Image (tube, helix red, strand yellow):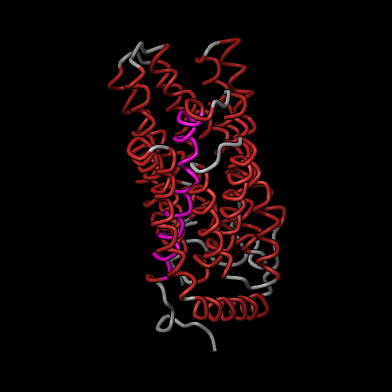
Amino acid sequence: MTIDAAERPGKFYSYLMMIGHICCDMNQSTIPALLPFLVAQRGIDYAAAAGLMFASSSLSSLIQPLLGMIADRRQMPWLMGAGIMMTGLGIASIGFLDSYWGIFAVVMFAGFGSALFHPEGARMANGVAGEKKGRAMSNFTTGGNLGFVIGPIVAAFAVSTWGLRGTAVALIPTIAVSSVFFGLQKKLASLSKQMQREMGRKASALGQKDDWPAFSRLFISILARSIVQNGVQTFVPLYWMSVLMRSQQQGSLMVTVMALASTAAAFTGGRLADRFGFRKIIRLAFSLMFPLIILMLMTKSVVVATVIVVLLAAMINLGHSPSVVLGQRYLPNRLGLASGVTLGLAVSVGGICSPLLGRIGDNYGLTTAFYVVAGVALLGFAGTLLLREPQSAAEPGG
């Protein structure tokens, strides 16, 4: 029996995936906020702090494609609840450890939990979405963005109030959300099996095959977006201080401003893609990144620069969820792998390139570093021109 429109769980499970993503990324995003406290109270140096960031994000991102491949072969929706629980336990443990390597281990444990959740969560978000896959993936990615906004605020408040052992606060949302996922395990397993059968029948009826050349071309743009995002997030606060001569507080405030703009864009990007076409929204987003960066470098007005940065942050995230869905459509028989690559591997590549951009900024100035970021955005736009309509579904207006 297929999952028809009347039987589809639709919005409930779509928003459940969103809530799970909020909780998972809220836990992960507390690590940067905890670093100043760990430096001051545990005596770790800056290199050790950078090592914790590597343990948290890069390793997690690199193994997501592998976990996605496993999820494609074996339906394991329990990975979502387990992943959320692992991230919360890992973060909560940090404040109770004195050893750096102990902290490193639990940060890796939390990162592994994040890697467990994302491919299966994105695969499930796709499967329960019906025809509104852009909307469902927007909900999912918006959850991640909200988590990254909420997490540092909660962490800073908890640790400032109760000391480093305030990291235990992470267990409250973790236990609540993971309990819901574990409680719905039988239903999620049933849905997962039905999704797999439905996709198999559809692939057989339509002769769907995985389009690796098309996915590879999309991957170029996804990598470009990741590099641009990391560059903008890193350099905008510094640009505010060293070029526009604003205070440290104003520079830091731009991080929050960009996060809010990114969240709004993530929420609308997939919905616009459902209506106008996934490729069109991805191309629109990339086509505006390059000129917005150049315009920001040309103005000395803080107000104008702020407006430009808001638009730039929005464009960087507008095409994110459409890119994830398009990747899943190019690989309809490997949704977990497609999700792991578009949500995980691409993020790590952007992070790996950040030190190189930083060296360019140190040697040639922040303006030059931004010109390099603008060039990467232009390369990403060129990549979008090579995208073609997937076999799995006709694109609206595509």
> So how many labels did they put on this image?
0
Which sits in the foreground, 309 or 184? 184
Residue drawn at x 40%, y 15% as measured from the top left: 298
State whether residue 350 is above or below residue 143. above
Which sits in the foreground, 4 or 192? 192
- Rendering quarter of residue 192: bottom right
Is residue 29 within the magenta segment? yes
Residue 102: x %, y % from top left: 62, 41
Residue 276 showing in the rendered view: no
State whether residue 228 is above or below residue 303. below
Left or right: residue 198 versus residue 395 is right
What secondary structure is the stretch in magenta mostly built from? Answer: helix
Q: Quadrant of the N terminus?
A: bottom right
Residue 260: x %, y % from top left: 34, 40
Residue drawn at x 44%, y 45% as measured from the top left: 167
Considering every residue shown, the one lying at the far left of the view is 303
- Rendering quarter of residue 246: top left
Left or right: residue 105 versus residue 273 is right
Is residue 273 within the magenta segment? no
Residue 160: x %, y % from top left: 35, 35
Magenta segment boundaries in residue numbering: 13-38
Residue drawn at x 55%, y 38% as measured from the top left: 225
Considering every residue shown, the one lying at the far bottom of the view is 1
Residue 7 showing in the rendered view: yes
Which sits in the foreground, 71 or 32? 32
Residue 290: x %, y % from top left: 49, 29
